[in-house]
């Protein structure tokens, strides 16, 4: 098992990355903590695969466990389910000395994290991410949130977990669609921060070849994220780089009501199109978007998503906005990204030009 330590003063935690340890989660927790009760939050798909195994291992270690399973899918990340979690945990008489565990993908991690941040003004929580996207991104760094009708992740908090446990064996049961969803974020790390990672992905033949390297890849991505979060926990500067591709990605996700495209598919589209814009602005070297397109296609990720004319309204709600200015993330080369501030109106013109006028 490999360990990464996230060094945030007063809120340090470890990320443990290994294989085949979900039956031993109870022992791992017992070595480190002593809660009396644990509430596990998961979804029905993950529950069928791992819920009982994780629950049994915690009970064997002496914890009193309540498992709550929710419907899978982005629609679960809402106020109604948050309220249901509060009432289930309170009926289990949870206290601040107890623990909450998020077992699942990004939806479960974000929702459960927000529950932990707010219930009784904060209960310690652990992330056990089971999708690639959750392992390399959402379980690390403490961003927790729900979606509201106005947009994704618009109600949330920064609340760091006490521990993150990543079992890369869990990735083997993911469908290609969900595995490739996470690959978009893996490719993103290569593009913004690690040319070697990008080259490894660019030169590999596909999912099968990557399977043997997943521990290493997950470790590399989490290490990049750890370094960024340590410098900018609250997303006021450097951390915005992690949003490469997300500005247009969020527009696509929202336009299709979070149903048609996965987050990773939307981000893939966003990374490709923002690189075309970067090339037009002469910030991103020519030919970059073409290389991005070819790596995305290898992992069945889309470069084109038809969008209507709601772009301006959705962009107006982007959390990276400062007044009428928007912070966009561009590549200065493969492996290096920068934040570029520009008026929202100017960005909308650039987007319209790239999406609707050029081929
Ligand atoms: N998912 C981007 C971040 O954690 O900042």
Image (cartoon, helix red, strand yellow):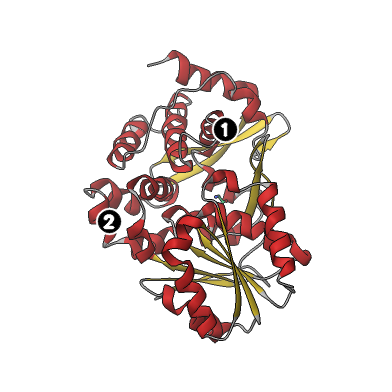
Q: Which quadrant holds the N terminus? A: bottom left
- Quadrant in the picture for residue 214: bottom left
Q: Which residue is mark 2?
A: 210
Where does the image place residue 277, in percent across and percent down from the top left?
Answer: 47, 27
Q: Which residue is mark 1?
A: 254
327 sits to left or right of 129: right
* Residue at 40 percent of width and 27 percent of height: 304
| Residue nearest the viewer, comparing 332 with 180 | 180
Q: Secondary structure at mark 1?
A: helix
Front label number (2 vs 1): 1
* Residue at 67 percent of width and 35 percent of height: 149
Q: Is residue 139 above or below residue 10?
A: above
Q: Which quadrant holds the C terminus? A: top left
- The reply to whether residue 44 is visible in this rendering is yes
Q: Secondary structure at mark 2?
A: helix
Where does the image place residue 343, in percent across and percent down from the top left?
Answer: 65, 26
Q: Is residue 307 above or below residue 127?
A: above
* Residue at 56 percent of width and 33 percent of height: 257
- The reply to whether residue 235 is visible in this rendering is no
Q: How many neighbours does mark 2 have within 10 angstroms: few (below 14), some (14-19), or many (20 or more)?
A: some
302 sits to left or right of 242: left
288 sits to left or right of 228: left
Q: How many neighbours does mark 1 have within 10 angstroms: few (below 14), some (14-19), or many (20 or more)?
A: many
- Quadrant in the picture for residue 162: bottom right
- Chain-order first, disc 2 or disc 1: 2
């Amino acid at each position: 098992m490999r360990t990464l330590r996230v060094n945030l003063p007063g809120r340090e935690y470890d990320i443990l990355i290994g294989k085949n340890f979900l039956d031993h989660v109870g022992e791992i927790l017992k070595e480190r903590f002593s809660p009396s009760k644990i509430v596990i939050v998961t979804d029905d798909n993950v529950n069928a695969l791992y819920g009982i195994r994780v629950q049994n291992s915690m009970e064997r270690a002496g914890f009193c466990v309540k498992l709550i399973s929710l419907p899978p899918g982005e629609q679960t990340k809402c106020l109604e389910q948050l309220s249901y979690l509060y009432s289930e945990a309170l009926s289990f008489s949870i206290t601040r000395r107890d623990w909450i565990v998020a077992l699942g993908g990004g939806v479960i991690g974000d929702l459960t994290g927000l529950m932990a941040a707010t219930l009784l003004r904060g209960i310690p929580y652990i992330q056990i991410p089971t999708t690639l996207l959750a392992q390399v991104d959402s379980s690390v760094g403490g961003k927790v949130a729900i979606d509201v009708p106005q947009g994704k992740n618009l109600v949330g908090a920064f609340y760091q977990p006490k521990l993150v446990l990543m079992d890369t064996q869990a990735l083997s049961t993911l469908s290609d669609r969900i595995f490739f969803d996470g690959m978009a974020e893996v490719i993103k790390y290569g593009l913004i921060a690690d040319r070697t990672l990008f080259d490894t992905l660019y030169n590999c033949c596909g999912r099968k070849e990557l399977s043997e390297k997943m521990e290493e890849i997950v470790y590399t991505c989490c290490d990049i994220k750890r370094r960024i979060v340590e410098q900018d926990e609250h997303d006021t500067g450097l951390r915005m780089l992690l949003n490469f591709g997300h500005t247009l990605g969020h527009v696509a996700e929202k336009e299709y009501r979070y149903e048609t495209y996965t987050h990773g598919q939307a981000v893939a589209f966003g990374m490709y199109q923002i690189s075309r814009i970067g090339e037009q602005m002469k910030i991103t070297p020519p030919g970059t978007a073409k290389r991005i397109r070819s790596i995305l296609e290898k992992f069945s990720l889309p470069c084109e998503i038809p969008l209507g004319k709601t772009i301006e309204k959705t962009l107006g709600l982007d959390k990276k906005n400062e007044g009428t200015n928007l912070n966009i993330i561009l590549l200065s080369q493969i492996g290096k990204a920068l934040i570029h501030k520009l008026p929202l109106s100017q960005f909308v013109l650039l987007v319209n030009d790239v999406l609707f006028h050029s081929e």
